């Protein structure tokens, strides 16, 4: 059997565009004499469409496109993902009972469709519980950005509703190849990640069930987002499947989509990574490049190859690719024909310089306009840095001084009398006025005037700590680096200069050494809203803290305090002893004071994060809809207070010796 894996770009909410791409790839597969072509999960309408899945009219519209696919199935088996509304279940099973979704609405499946020669393919063992040619997803993810349980009814739910064993409805389909019927098992995305789904003490493993029921090959249709290390994790999952099935294991083909989708708060990239594994679970064929649409042809010769070794880019290089794709998605998510123009506040600091460079690589220099908005607090060095990056990128940079506007706003507010008295503005209030004039008065209005969008330049550390002004720098259409720590922003700046531009586009004046120290002739990060201001963050150390506290396996502050007592901060946070010394973390009192400021700042600023623009997801847990937060007051736990007492009795932090 010759199989085509269609690693296609899926555009959410654009079924006509997706179907056109599918039909073109079907035509190419036929030209190459494929017996079967497999497309990704939810490839007709996209996967991340939010509560549109609750609208029957939206779902029914997507199913109308099935006719075009069915018509193209002459001489070839077509396998693809789409929604299925099971409105006729009671008639099909003949029981007259009510069979709703779990929410009482119409039962919907995130389904595999299997058709060949103008009709649904047959199962090895027919069941009236499922429509012909339809296989629902077995395992529904309900974590991170996934909400399958909110919308869909699983194959496991179908079996439970009917009072039958899951194994009885998990059947391979028969694919006609030259008159011979080949049983092939089809599954969807999460069905591969089954090790953590448990039933009677064992993994609930759809792959093993399909193999036990006679499948000679497994094809997994996925819509699996990019995260660093995903390909390696996928390989390990297939290794688990092989161990579960032993010598009975069969070739496993994985096809994923490419492109970008969003959930309103996060922009999520899909890099493909389609892979063919032989019967010994060794990867024998990879897609050529991440994020690229591709038709992979698989035959017996491919399956007979020895295992191949993956070659992947560095972590920061992969994140760069993700950011570029995420920025380019703004066009599709807004329904624009062309990339929009962007207005960016270009202060000369590291964050705005990196965002400007990313914008130019994503949409072109002719779509980017820099704006420098100085007051008397802005140094000549930062203004020169802004001019430097604009000149190197080939973008215009206009200067709009805001000093007079700031003074007028301050005077206006201080003249207001309430109950016969006037209130003087604090230093913090004056800082916020400057930020609001920059973001709301200048950038948002200039963007509207130019029919453009403006960016949010905040990094993950600033997003977490709320080191930004609501309706000032918390604004914009997109937050390109909102999921990068400050350490990663510095690393990305070096990468952009060395590997992307091959030039000092981002001034070395804003890039520190490995311990995040700046020379006197450099520019230390600052909001420049008052004299001699520098950012309060302890770069590197705070970056490691936020990575630990927002990891998929989230580490609470109490864990950090235990590591301090154990002398294992370096091991668990991935930082050096020199960095801890640089920030005086060896002093127990300073460690506690800083940690409590850090976690209280995170808790206090949820109200800003929920109003922030969409963040491109680059980590294993991003602010937005990946991390779901309620606005609550901060309260230390009893364990926190207990550990605090123990730490404050220490003379100093003592790291354990490596290997001891």
Image (tube, rainbow, N blue to C red):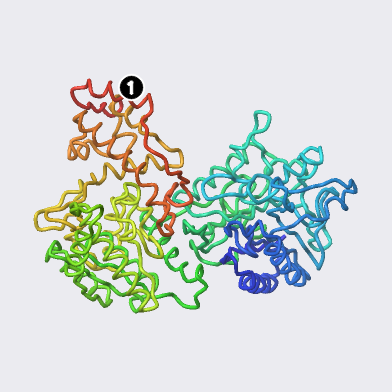
Q: Is residue 103 above or below residue 449?
A: above
Residue 426 point in image, percent of width and height: 19, 51
| Closest to the observer, 563 or 658 | 563
Work out whether residue 297 can be spotted: no
Q: Is residue 230 left or right of residue 128?
A: left
> Percent position (x, y) of residue 51?
61, 56
**Residue drawn at 46 percent across, 68 percent down:** 330
Residue 214 x, y percent position in the rendering: 77, 45
Residue visible at 39% across and 71% down?
453
Identity of the residue furthest to the front in this view: 420
Q: Secondary structure at mark 1?
A: helix
Residue 440 falls left or right of residue 153: left
Furthest-left residue in this view? 520
Which part of the image, by quadrant, shows the N terminus?
bottom right
Indicate the quadrant containing the C terminus: top left, top right, bottom left or bottom right. Answer: top left
608 or 257: nearer the viewer: 608
Q: From what the image shows, is residue 637 above or below residue 276?
A: above
Q: Which residue is mark 1?
A: 642
Relative image position of residue 185 (x, y in whole percent):
72, 50
> Is 365 placed above or below 582 here?
below
């Amino acid at each position: 059997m010759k199989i085509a894996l269609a690693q296609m770009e899926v555009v959410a909410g654009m079924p006509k565009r997706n179907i056109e791409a599918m039909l073109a790839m079907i035509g190419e597969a036929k030209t190459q004499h494929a017996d079967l072509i497999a497309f990704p999960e939810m490839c007709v309408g996209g996967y991340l469409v939010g509560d549109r899945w609750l609208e029957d009219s939206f779902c029914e519209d997507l199913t109308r496109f099935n006719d075009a696919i069915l018509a193209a199935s002459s001489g070839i088996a077509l396998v693809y993902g789409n929604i299925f509304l099971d409105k006729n279940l009671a008639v099909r099973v003949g029981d007259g009972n009510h069979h709703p979704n779990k929410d009482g609405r119409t039962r919907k499946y995130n389904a595999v469709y299997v058709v060949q020669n103008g009709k649904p393919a047959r199962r090895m063992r027919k069941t009236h519980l499922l429509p012909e040619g339809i296989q629902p997803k077995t395992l529904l993810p309900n974590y991170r950005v996934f909400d399958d349980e909110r919308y869909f009814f699983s194959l496991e739910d179908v079996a439970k509703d009917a009072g039958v064993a899951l194994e009885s409805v998990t059947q391979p389909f028969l694919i006609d190849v030259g008159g011979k019927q080949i049983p092939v098992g089809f599954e969807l995305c999460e069905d591969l990640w089954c090790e953590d789904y448990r039933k009677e003490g064992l993994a609930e493993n759809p792959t093993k069930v399909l193999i036990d029921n006679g499948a000679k090959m497994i094809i997994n249709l996925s819509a699996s987002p990019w995260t660093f290390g995903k390909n390696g994790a996928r390989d390990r999952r297939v290794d688990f499947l092989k161990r579960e099935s032993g010598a009975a294991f069969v070739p496993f083909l994985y096809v994923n989509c490419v492109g970008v989708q969003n959930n309103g708060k996060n922009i999520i990239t899909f890099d493909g990574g389609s892979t063919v594994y032989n019967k010994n679970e060794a990867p024998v064929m990879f897609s050529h490049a991440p994020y690229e649409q591709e038709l992979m042809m698989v035959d017996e010769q491919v399956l007979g190859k020895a295992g191949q070794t993956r070659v992947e880019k560095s972590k920061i290089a992969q994140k760069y690719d993700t950011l570029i794709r995420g920025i380019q998605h703004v066009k599709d998510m807004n329904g624009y024909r062309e990339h929009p123009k962007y207005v960016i506040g270009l202060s000369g600091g590291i964050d705005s310089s990196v965002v400007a460079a990313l914008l130019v690589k994503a949409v072109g220099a002719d779509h980017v306009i820099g704006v420098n908005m100085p007051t008397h607090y802005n140094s000549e060095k930062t203004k020169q840095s802004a001019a430097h990056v604009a000149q190197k990128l080939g973008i215009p940079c206009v200067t709009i001084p805001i000093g007079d506007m700031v003074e007028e706003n301050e005077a206006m507010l201080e003249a207001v009398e309430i109950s016969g008295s006037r209130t003087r503005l604090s230093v913090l209030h004056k800082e916020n006025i400057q930020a609001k004039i920059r973001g709301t008065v200048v950038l948002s209005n200039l963007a509207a005037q130019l029919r453009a969008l403006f960016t949010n330049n905040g990094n993950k550390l600033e997003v977490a700590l709320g080191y930004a002004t609501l309706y000032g720098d918390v604004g914009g259409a997109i937050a390109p680096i909102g999921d990068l720590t400050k350490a990663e922003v510095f690393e990305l700046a070096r990468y952009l200069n060395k590997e992307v531009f091959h030039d000092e586009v981002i001034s070395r004046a804003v890039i520190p050494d490995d311990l995040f120290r700046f020379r006197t002739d450099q520019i230390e990060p600052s909001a420049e809203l008052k004299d001699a201001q520098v950012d309060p963050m302890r770069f590197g150390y705070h970056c490691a803290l936020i990575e630990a506290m927002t990891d998929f396996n989230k580490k609470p502050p109490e864990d950090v305090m235990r590591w301090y007592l154990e002398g294992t901060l370096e091991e668990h946070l991935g930082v050096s002893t020199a960095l801890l010394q640089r920030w005086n973390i060896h002093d127990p009192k300073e460690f506690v004071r800083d940690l409590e400021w850090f976690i209280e700042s995170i808790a206090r600023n949820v109200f800003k994060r929920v109003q922030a623009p969409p963040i491109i997801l680059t980590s294993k847990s991003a602010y937005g809809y990946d991390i779901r937060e309620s606005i609550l007051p901060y309260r230390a736990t009893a364990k926190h207070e207990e550990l605090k007492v123990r730490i404050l009795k220490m003379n100093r932090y003592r790291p354990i010796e490596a290997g001891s």
